[in-house]
Amino acid sequence: MVVGSMGSLVLKPIEDLYGTSIDLPIQLIKPDPENLREEFDQEDLIDLGNNMKQIGQLDEITVFPILTETSNWAGCFDLHDGERRWRAAKLVGLATLRARIVERPSHEELVYKKVSRVLQTRSLTPEQKVRGLEKAMSELGIMDQPEVWESHRERLGGGQEWPQLVRVLQLKPRVRGLLDNGAINFTVAQSVGRLPLEKQEEAAEYGVVNKLNGRFFSTQVVPYLLEEPDASLPQAFEHTRVGDWKQYSKTPFQKGLAPEVNERVEAFLEACVEWERAWEVAVRTALADEIKGNDNYEYRLKDAARRIAERAQALIARIHQDGQNQIRIPELGALPEPKQLSHTKPYQ
């Protein structure tokens, strides 16, 4: 039912207000001070407000009547759903909002409704959802009872992100602090949450100190540590940055068909000779000088050389690995110097 004027509301018993809709003056609507959503994009709100000016308000907000001690209507309303629309209307100077008046539910039911709305809002970041879920669980008195969280999942509105969200909620305080101050992002934080508690701080801090790419850390380093729980962080990093570590975690040969060690060593050394020959050609033809000034060629050659150097370094690290999975990496400069080539003029 739509009520035509504010005056008619004053004359009605409080029970008759519920379920009615009316154009409410903005100043009579009070936002929820405990809204789980704490951040709103100003430009986005202005765009919404201007759109509401042009085509009207598409969806009504919902409000609770504020009651006096004698259960009479106090003349204003608490905002239940629609703070984004309310903020947008204020920014662009709208005088009223179409609102539906509903009865205030119990505190517990209200918390469930609030957090469900937060978790189901796609425009909110995972970090915002974590904070909202944490606040709701605290209000429900279950924050320190992770064993019961799953039983509340459906009422809390947990969707596909639920496993990652609760993983972050259970992080060790030091790791959670790195997330809250922006040292790591949500992707890294939730991946660290997959590790045993005793390894979480070390892993997160290793990623921060070494400035590891978040995607690489979460899709390579953490899975490696889960598969190799006794591995150190340096070992995990060296093995994963070489690439294809999963492929070589087990022998690629069928039982009894693996070539002799000496055959594999010789095959490896022959492949290395191909790189040495390519390097010699580049020197003889003064290729490095010829490509100067061409950003594309310079980048491609530098990147190829860098990748080869990284793989060589990783191989040296494995050879020098001791029984405690600690890797001692000698400086490349400690290797024998390559044989000097005779000077040859570049091709004419």
Image (cartoon, rainbow, N blue to C red):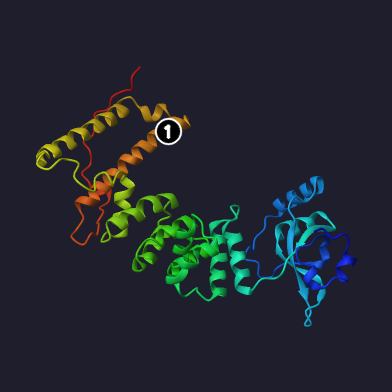
Report whether 304 appears left or right of 190.
left
> Quadrant of the image for the N terminus?
bottom right
Task: Identify which residue, 320 or 120, lies in the foreground.
Answer: 120
Residue 148 location in percent, x, y?
45, 71
Q: Which residue is found at the position 60% from the left and 52% from the top?
A: 123
| Residue at x 41% of width, y 59% of height | 209
Q: In the displayed structure, does residue 249 sit left or right of residue 118? A: left
Q: Nearer the viewer, residue 310 or 170?
A: 170
- Total tally of numbered discs in the picture: 1
The quarter holding residue 95 reads: bottom right
With 192 as the anchor, is 250 left or right in this view?
left
Residue at point 43% right, 35% down? Answer: 299
Residue 304: x %, y % from top left: 35, 36
Please state, as top left, top right, bottom left or bottom right, where the C terminus lies in the image.
Answer: top left
Residue 327 seen in the figure: yes
Please provide percent x and percent y for residue 280: 27, 29
Q: Is residue 185 visible?
A: no
Which residue sits furthest right?
7
Q: Give the image location of residue 103, x and y in percent.
A: 72, 69
Q: Nearer the viewer, residue 102 or 87?
A: 102
**Quarter of the image holding residue 100?**
bottom right
Look at the picture and state if 69 lies above or below 268.
Answer: below
Q: Amino acid at mark 1?
A: Glu
Residue at the image position 15 percent from the left and 40 percent from the top: 254
Mark 1: which secondary structure? helix
Q: Quadrant of residue 105?
A: bottom right
| Left or right: 142 in relation to 224 | right
Q: What residue would you read off at disc 1? A: 298
Q: Nearer the viewer, residue 47 or 346?
A: 47
